Amino acid sequence: MSTLKKISLVLLIIGYVAAGINHFRIPQFYIGIIPAYMPFPNILNTLAGVLEIAGGLGLIFKSTRQFAAWGIVLLLIAFIPVHTAMLSGHTQIGATHVQPVLAWARLFFQPVLILWAWWHTRN
């Protein structure tokens, strides 16, 4: 594995484990961006956190890396409705409304994250 890919892998592991932990540290942030039409936001938040942690940890081991990377790709695709719903300008995190420019930036960044995880599905 190239040095660049090793660095990328370490960043992904740290990023997804940290993001997953944040679902439990500051659940109100994540619950605030779940669209109203999605049922059981508390459960969805917990599930997303668990899956992000599991995906990040799964990247550590060569035997589970490809499966974990595909799981992260699918998780990122599953998050797209959350990011598109944020474009409405009605998403609120605490007392703060998500500004449409930030929602657009996040939505445009999503394919980059998907490609980054996908890169680690390849040997």
Image (cartoon, rainbow, N blue to C red):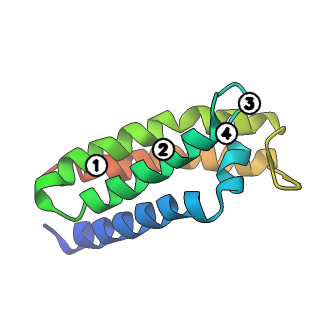
Residue 118 in percent (x, y) is at 30, 46
Depth-wise, is mark 1 or mark 2 nearer the camera?
2
- The label shown at residue 36 is 3
Which one is in front, 43 or 3? Answer: 43
Closer to the camera, 37 or 84?
Answer: 37
Q: Amino acid at mark 2?
A: Leu
**Residue 122 % position (x, y):** 17, 48
Q: Amino acid at mark 3?
A: Ala
Residue flagged by tag 1: what amino acid is it?
Ala
Q: Residue at x 49, y 46 (%)?
A: 48
Disc assigned to residue 47: 2
Do the numbered discs 2 and 4 sit on residues whose CB atoms are within 8 Å? no
Q: Quadrant of residue 27?
A: bottom right
Q: Is residue 39 left or right of residue 117?
A: right
In the image, which disc is placed on residue 81?
A: none
Badge 4 is on which residue? 34
Marks 3/4 in contact by CB < 8 Å: the verdict is yes
Which residue is at a point 36% across and 53% down the rendered structure image?
A: 116
Q: CA distance from mark 1 to mark 2?
A: 17 Å
The residue drawn where x is 83% and y is 39% is 89
> Which label is found at residue 69?
1
Q: CA distance from mark 3 to mark 1?
A: 29 Å
Residue 23 percent across, percent down from the top left: 57, 57
- Residue 73 position by quadrant: top left
